[in-house]
Image: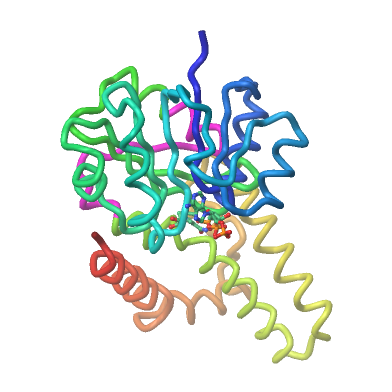
């Protein structure tokens, strides 16, 4: 018998998870979606997935093995409490919401409930995300393995024992795609400042970031070696890197950016 999955919230992240589960051959019959957006639910029911607009519309004796909360953190206070009506002792709860701690869910659902807090990132949409997960004390090895399979459907998964690390994870890989997209933006602007037409500069920056990312993904070499491979001594790349790697270059700026995001994540925690 296969496990029943209840997904609560089927926006960008929830939708990516469903696509990943279907690609990984999870049974359509085992996935149920709750989302108030009827456009979303209709698109899922059209594909044979059960979808309802409210928790109260779930079938009477429906008992999932796992509930995945993929709603915005700010609606969590209203969203979570009705799920207490499930048999919480035989269900594992996964949350992918930023800033919502294991203790937060234990307070609502009960201290003996198995909870996994996970932080994915948007490349999950193309099954190339990286998710970091942390299980509550009550999470068994079997439950953890099942959660791993669910999260792995959208990319790689790492586990940490110390939940305190999730703030830095949120800052680094959770928000990381935005910094990389910004890199494409600033490179394009710099290319224009050096005389390239805007369309060409944007295309060069975009495809360079995408191609270098793919090379990094496929290579087993460290990033520093791949960088060295395109840097001839005394050449043009070396001149640019003198600026970027100077004492006031990218490293201190990135240190500051990640530190600021980490402390913001701590502030938002609840
Ligand atoms: N996007 C990221 O980069 C990222 C990265 C890591 C983690 N996350 C986390 O992932 C979670 C989801 O983010 P997202 O970007 O996927 O948000 P999203 O696109 O806004 O999706 C959330 C979905 O939940 C629905 N929803 C609202 N109230 C609900 C309820 N009571 N029951 C069921 N569904 C409900 C929303 O419907 P309506 O639109 O009709 O309200 C929407 O379809 C957030 O907690 C976020 O912190 C996001």
- Residue 162 occupies quadrant: top left
Residue 15 appears at what percent x and percent y?
Answer: 61, 45
Residue in view at x 70 percent, y 91 percent:
193
In the image, 61 versus 124, the foreground residue is 61
- The correct choice, above or below, for 32 with respect to 38 in the image is above
Identify which residue is drawn at 27% across, 31% down: 114
Classify 28 as above or below 36.
above
**Residue found at the far top of this picture:** 1
- Quadrant including the C terminus: bottom left
Task: Write down the quadrant of residue 212 in the picture.
Answer: bottom right
The answer to which of 5 and 42 lies nearer the viewer is: 42
Based on the picture, tell me whether residue 158 belongs to the magenta stretch.
yes
**Taking 79 as reference, is 212 left or right?**
right
Front-lying residue, 180 or 79: 79
Q: What's the residue at 83%, 79% (across, down)?
A: 199
Q: Position of residue 253 (x, y in %)?
A: 38, 78
Task: Let me know if residue 111 is in the magenta part.
Answer: no
Please state if 131 lies on the left or on the right of 204 as rendered.
Answer: left
Q: What percent of the width, then of the height, locates residue 217?
A: 58, 44
| Horizontal side of residue 150 vs 195, given as left or right | left
Quarter of image, res 115 = top left
Residue at 36% across, 47% down: 80
Q: How far across and down, in percent of the image, does residue 39 sit?
A: 71, 52
Q: From what the image shows, is residue 90 above or below residue 55?
A: above
Magenta range: 148-166
Answer above or below: position of 148 versus 177. above
Colour setup of the view: rainbow
Q: How many marks?
A: 0
């Amino acid at each position: 018998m296969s496990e029943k999955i209840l997904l609560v919230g089927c926006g960008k992240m929830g939708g990516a998870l469903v696509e990943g589960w279907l690609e990984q051959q999870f049974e359509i019959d085992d996935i149920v979606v709750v989302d108030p957006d009827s456009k979303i639910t209709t698109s899922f029911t059209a594909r044979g997935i059960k979808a309802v607009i409210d928790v109260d519309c779930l079938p009477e004796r429906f008992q999932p093995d796992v509930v995945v909360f993929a709603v915005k953190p700010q609606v969590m206070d209203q969203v979570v409490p009705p799920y207490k009506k499930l048999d919480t002792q035989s269900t594992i709860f996964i949350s992918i919401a930023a800033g919502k701690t294991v203790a937060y869910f234990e307070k609502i659902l009960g201290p003996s409930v198995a909870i996994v807090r996970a932080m994915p990132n948007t490349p999950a949409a193309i099954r190339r995300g990286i998710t970091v997960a942390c299980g509550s004390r009550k999470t068994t090895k079997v439950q953890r393995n099942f959660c791993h399979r669910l999260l792995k459907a959208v990319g790689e998964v790492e586990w940490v024992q110390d939940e305190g690390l999730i703030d830095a994870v949120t800052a680094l890989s959770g928000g990381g795609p935005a910094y990389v997209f910004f890199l494409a933006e600033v490179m394009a602007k710099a290319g224009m400042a050096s005389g390239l037409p805007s369309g060409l500069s944007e295309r060069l920056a975009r495809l360079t970031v995408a191609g270098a990312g793919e090379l990094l993904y496929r290579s087993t070499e460290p990033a520093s070696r791949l960088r060295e491979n395109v840097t001839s001594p005394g050449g043009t790349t070396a001149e640019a890197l003198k600026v970027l790697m100077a004492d006031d270059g990218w490293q201190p700026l990135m240190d500051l950016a990640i530190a600021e995001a980490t402390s913001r994540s701590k502030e938002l925690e609840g």
